[in-house]
Image (cartoon, helix red, strand yellow):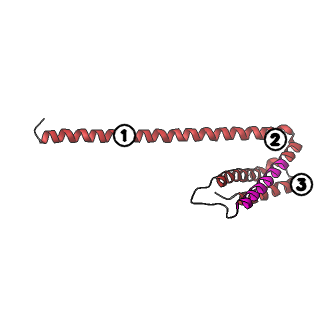
Amino acid sequence: MIDPISTVALASGAFKTIKAAISTGKDLESMGKTFATWGKACADFNKAEDRNKNPPWWQKTFKGSDEEEAIMIWNQRRKMDEMRKALKDEISFYYGPSAWEEILRIEAEQRKRRKQEAYERQEFIDNVINTVIVIVSLVVFCSVAFGVVWILKERGVL
């Protein structure tokens, strides 16, 4: 996991590339990889920001005072919001407002799909754990039953 400052630097680099390409008249559709880099940096920033709010006990992601950390996070969040707004304006200008709405719709669909996949993955893990528990319990029960029968036969009770 990279820290919020690194993600903003990555997003800024992709953003500058996008802005430069737009100013030279490059087609936005041909810059899919750069948009993807920017989008991934935004997602990483959001994840790093969430993780920074509640870091593991063994890891502190930022070594400074609470005030310094709050200002840094606020500043980075502001930069990310400004970049997102600028991209929204550029896309809306070239492709119309419906293009940005379509991006938001696709983003929501992706989020929903990933959430569903996470639920399905967790359900699969739960099923595997339950199956292992049942099999282990069955083996233990059969072993105990076999042991009891064997002991009883050795003593001549059966």
103 and 2: which one is in front? Answer: 2
Examine the structure image and report whether residue 74 is included in the region drawn in magenta.
yes
63 and 39: which one is in front? Answer: 63
What separation in Å lies between label 1 and label 3 (alpha carbons)? 64 Å
Residue at (81% x, 41% y) in the render: 100
Please give the residue where the numbered disc 3 appears in the rendered image.
Answer: 23
Q: Amino acid at mark 1?
A: Ile
Task: Give x and y (percent) for residue 23.
Answer: 89, 54
Q: Residue furthest left?
A: 156
What separation in Å lies between label 3 and label 2 (alpha carbons)? 19 Å
Task: Give x and y (percent) for residue 122.
Answer: 53, 41
**Which callout, 3 or 2, points to the residue nearer the camera?**
2
| Among the two numbered marks 1 and 2 on one chain, the one whose residue lies closer to the N terminus | 2
Looking at the rendering, the stretch of residues picked out in magenta corresponds to: 64-87
What's the mark number on residue 135?
1
What's the mark number on residue 100?
2
Residue at (78% x, 38% y) in the render: 102
| Among the two numbered marks 3 and 2 on one chain, the one whose residue lies closer to the N terminus | 3
| Among the two numbered marks 1 and 3 on one chain, the one whose residue lies closer to the N terminus | 3
Examine the structure image and report whether residue 107 is included in the region drawn in magenta.
no
Q: Amino acid at mark 3?
A: Ser
When asked about the image quadrant of residue 142, the answer is: top left
